[in-house]
């Protein structure tokens, strides 16, 4: 087995790149490394059990179907929903689109064309909402307070009789700030609006909040929970016997309850299932490891005058968004690139060089926004040579 690195090809025994030739990866909110047990099962289904789960005339298809159903069960157990309420997609972006655009037909028929969301959503939510706006929908975006959190009371005040859906991310991808999901569910308890949660950053990490039966739709991605890229799911919880009234966005084949046609990538589906099962069993240990790493990071960086963006009280234990006064984020990323791999925002918008809409919505000063970097790690992250990091940051500080 071989891996491509910047130095050529190196032989390896595991699916992970040699940490001897690479900086420490601190961009796990963009994508995580794959657990070795997940990689093994994905490879097995590529090389040995490569059947199409829609092939019903032979054993290869039967075993593929069984593997897909097992994966559906593994994902549903993590969310405490039913197996047949899981629809496999290519990832959370597609799931978000299916959830929001898929509700449009039912909303239009009902005459209730108001949607409430937040100003800090991922573009995979904001852009579908913008599209719905061109189709006559009225969109209300709730801003966060300075902590990075949206107030559930503000959502209550935005609700109207014609509100058909509410869409709130569970944790922000740039700041790591967790939104008050339980409080929002309580706000919506007596309202019929459908609640969609983008859980790309929290599925398999924060377990109990996503098991709340008031949440109708949950989007998730495999590559955020140490699984493969290119696979995700949309959970569609029934209300009693009533299904969420989704309409498909693409057509042809009838797979996934006629909502997401196309041949399922069985190896990726199985990988997502195994990653979900491991996450359910291991999330507490993983969280503990992340807290320990975060403590070391803060001890190294905060004394340098770093400004943390968003309240630590509400932040995921594996994320920090901060800036150093007088240092531009691009300059800092370049200075540290041989030591740590970090980012200055969402991977999906990193090529645009536009100020973060999340940090702008939080009311940060322009200098803090232009200097903001995001560091995100995981239970597999090795130790960082923080003394070297500190030295290079010192060299960039205005007083030096």
Image (cartoon, rainbow, N blue to C red):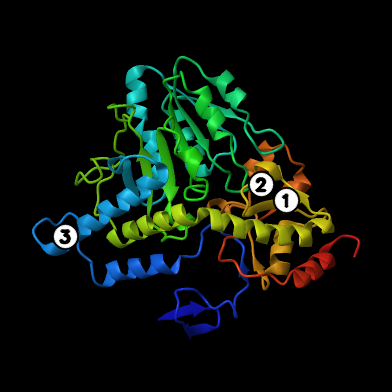
Give the image location of residue 220, x and y in percent: 43, 47
The quadrant in which the N terminus is found is: bottom left
150, 93: nearer the viewer: 150
Give the image location of residue 297, x and y in percent: 72, 61
Image point 31% across, 62% down: which residue? Answer: 267
Q: Which residue is mark 3?
A: 61
Identify the secondary structure beneath mark 3. helix
Q: Which residue is mark 1?
A: 370
Q: Which residue is mark 2?
A: 355
Image point 78% across, 49% down: which residue? Answer: 307
Location of residue 306 by image quarter:
bottom right
Earlier along the polypeptide chain: callout 1 or callout 2? 2
Residue found farthest to the right: 399
Q: Which mark is residue 354?
A: none
Image point 28% across, 44% down: which residue? Answer: 260
1, 337: nearer the viewer: 1
Identify the secondary structure beneath mark 1. helix
Above or below — where is 224 with respect to 152? below
Give the image location of residue 367, x and y in percent: 78, 48
Above or below — where is 309 with respect to 152? below
The Cα–Cα distance between marks 1 and 2, rounded to whole angstroms, is 7 Å
Location of residue 183 by image quarter:
top right
Above or below — where is 334 with respect to 218? below
- The answer to whether 205 appears left or right of 398 in the picture is left
The quadrant in which the C terminus is found is: bottom right
């Amino acid at each position: 087995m071989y891996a491509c690195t910047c130095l050529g090809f190196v032989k390896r025994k595991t699916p992970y790149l040699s940490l001897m030739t690479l900086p420490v990866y601190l961009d796990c909110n963009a994508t995580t490394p794959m657990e070795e047990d997940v990689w093994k099962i994905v490879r097995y289904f590529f090389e040995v059990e490569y059947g199409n789960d829609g092939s019903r005339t032979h054993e290869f298809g039967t075993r593929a179907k069984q593997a897909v159903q097992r994966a559906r069960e593994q994902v549903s157990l993590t969310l405490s929903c039913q197996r047949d309420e899981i629809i496999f997609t290519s990832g959370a972006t597609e799931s978000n689109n299916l959830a929001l655009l898929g509700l449009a037909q039912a909303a239009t028929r009902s005459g209730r064309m108001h949607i409430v969301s937040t100003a800090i959503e991922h573009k995979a939510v904001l852009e579908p909402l913008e599209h719905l706006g061109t189709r006559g929908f009225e969109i209300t975006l709730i801003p966060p307070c300075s902590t990075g959190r949206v107030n559930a009371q503000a959502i209550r005040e935005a609700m109207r009789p014609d509100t058909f859906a509410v869409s709130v991310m569970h944790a922000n991808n740039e700041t790591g700030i967790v939104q008050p999901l339980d409080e929002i569910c309580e706000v919506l308890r007596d309202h019929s609006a459908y609640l969609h949660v983008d859980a790309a950053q929290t599925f398999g990490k924060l377990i109990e909040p996503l098991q709340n039966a008031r949440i109708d739709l949950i989007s998730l991605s495999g590559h955020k929970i140490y699984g493969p890229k290119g696979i995700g799911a949309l959970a569609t919880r029934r209300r009693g016997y009533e299904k969420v009234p989704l309409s498909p966005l693409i057509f042809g084949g009838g797979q996934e309850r006629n909502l997401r046609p196309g041949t399922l990538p069985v190896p990726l589906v199985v990988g997502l299932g195994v990653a979900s099962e491991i996450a359910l069993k291991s999330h507490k240990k993983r969280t503990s490891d992340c807290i320990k790493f975060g403590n070391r990071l803060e001890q190294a960086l905060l004394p340098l005058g770093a400004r943390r963006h968003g309240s630590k009280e509400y932040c995921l234990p594996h994320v920090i968004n901060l800036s150093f006064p007088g240092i531009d984020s691009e300059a800092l990323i370049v200075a540290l690139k041989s030591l740590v791999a970090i980012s200055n925002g969402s991977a999906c918008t990193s090529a645009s060089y536009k100020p973060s809409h999340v940090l702008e919505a939080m009311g940060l000063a322009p200098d803090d926004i232009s200097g903001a970097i995001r560091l995100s790690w995981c239970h597999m992250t090795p130790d960082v040579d923080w003394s070297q990091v500190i030295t290079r940051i010192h060299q960039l500080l205005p007083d030096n």
